[in-house]
Image: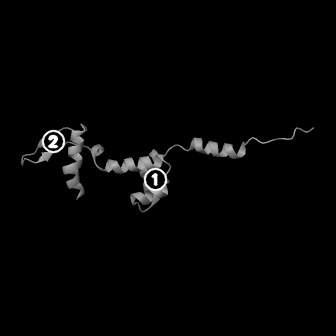
Amino acid sequence: MRARSYSETVWKPALVKAGVIPEPTKDPRGRRKYTTTRREGTHQCRHYYASVTLADGVSIKELSEYLGHHDPSVTLSIYAHMLPSSHDRARKAIGARWFKPRAVPDGT
């Protein structure tokens, strides 16, 4: 099924039922006309997939392959704002190695 056909026959009617977009109007030829923005398009599923996989720790390189991008820099430029903060992980990694408690001779 072509993307436009899927959008018109499955996706948009589902959005109407879910109350996300209003009921369609009819154009002069009697065809359904949906009122949508880019925020309600099927491409949002792709962004959701990317955000979930990044949140679960999938690397940009792997995600780039999954999404079919030719270069991870493309993926990074689109999804960098979705990367989980690594500050805490970096602090913990350094802390676990540099500041590991160890026995010190008491000198007696």
Image check: 47 left or right of 81?
left
Circle number at residue 76: 1
Question: Could you tell me residue 68's position as x and y percent?
Answer: 39, 60
Image check: 82 left or right of 1?
right
Q: Specify the amino acid type for callout 1.
A: Leu
Q: Secondary structure at mark 1?
A: helix
- Number of other residues with Cα within 10 Å of mark 1, as a class: few under 14, some 14 to 19, many 20 or more: some
Mark 2 highlights which residue?
A: 24
**Which is more N-terminal, label 2 or label 1?**
2
Query: Residue 37 is drawn in which quadrant?
Result: top left
Q: State the CA–CA distance, disc 1 to disc 2.
A: 37 Å
Q: Secondary structure at mark 2?
A: loop
Could you tell me if the residues under marks 1 and 2 are in contact, i.e. CB atoms within 8 Å?
Answer: no
- For the point 46% across and 53% down, the residue is 76
Question: Could you tell me residue 7's position as x and y percent?
Answer: 23, 51
Question: Could you tell me residue 55's position as x and y percent?
Answer: 47, 46
